[in-house]
Image (cartoon, rainbow, N blue to C red):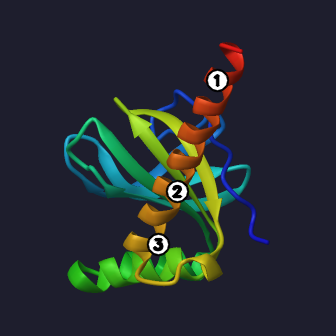
């Protein structure tokens, strides 16, 4: 299994841990939304796949090879988007939800669980995780009032 990025809850999505360094920004709105990070000698692609201009957003992180980085550097426009999608589809990724630019929830998604396109697959996994958390919280509330 590919080494996953280590995140710190409460961190900025483009600086997801004290041990992560922002190496390159490929796209930005009012903040970086796609780029390259380095952590513990490994490189990771990050991409805000939903909510780039909202207070709630979903991020994907994937370990990348030197070859992947060369492909990203060489691609432009629609080809760049296809390259990002191909990287995210090909390996386990860490998906994270940020609220107010603070990481709040994370999960690892294996490539074989993404049955449709990468966006839908990540969003389905994130929503499922959030729904599971909501059910667990409801169960705890019931126990609390017993």
Query: Which disc number belongs to residue 70?
Result: none
115 up-or-down from 47: above or below: below
Read off the residue under disc 3: 121
x 48%, y 59%: residue: 60
Residues at marks 2 and 3 touching, judged by CB atoms closer than 8 Å: no
- Tell me where residue 9 appears, x and y as whole percent: 58, 31
The quadrant in which residue 44 appears is bottom right
Find the distance from the CA under tag 2 to the CA under tag 3. Answer: 11 Å
The residue labelled by disc 2 is 128
Tally the numbered discs. Answer: 3
**Between discs 3 and 1, the one toward the N terminus:** 3
- Which residue is the extreme one toward the top? 145
Secondary structure under the numbered disc 1 in the rendered image: helix
Residue 137 visible in the displayed image: yes
Tell me the quadrant of the picture where the N terminus can be found: bottom right
Pinpoint residue 30: horizontal percent, then vertical percent.
20, 41
| In the depicted structure, whether residue 134 falls above or below residue 121 | above
Which residue appears at 64% of the width and 23% of the height? 142
Circles 1 and 2, Cβ within 8 Å, touching? The answer is: no
At 20% from the left and 48% from the top, the residue drawn is 29
Q: Tag 3 or tag 2, which sits nearer the N-term?
A: 3
Residue at which label 1 appears: 142
- Percent of width and height locating residue 64: 60, 71
In the drawing, does residue 24 fall left or right of residue 131? left
Which quadrant does the C terminus fall into? top right
- Farthest residue toward the front? 146
């Amino acid at each position: 299994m590919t080494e996953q990025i280590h995140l710190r809850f409460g961190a900025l999505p483009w600086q997801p841990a004290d041990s992560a360094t922002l190496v390159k920004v490929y796209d930005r709105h009012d903040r970086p939304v796609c780029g390259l990070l380095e952590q513990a000698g490994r490189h990771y692609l990050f991409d805000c796949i939903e909510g780039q201009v909202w207070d709630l957003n979903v991020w994907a992180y994937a370990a990348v090879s030197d070859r992947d980085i060369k492909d990203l550097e060489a691609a432009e426009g629609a080809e760049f988007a296809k390259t990002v999608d191909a990287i995210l589809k090909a390996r386990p990724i860490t998906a994270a939800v940020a609220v107010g630019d603070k990481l709040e929830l994370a999960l690892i998604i294996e490539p074989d669980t993404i049955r449709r396109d990468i966006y839908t697959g990540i969003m389905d996994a994130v929503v499922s995780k959030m729904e599971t958390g909501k059910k667990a919280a409801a169960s705890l509330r019931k126990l609390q009032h017993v």
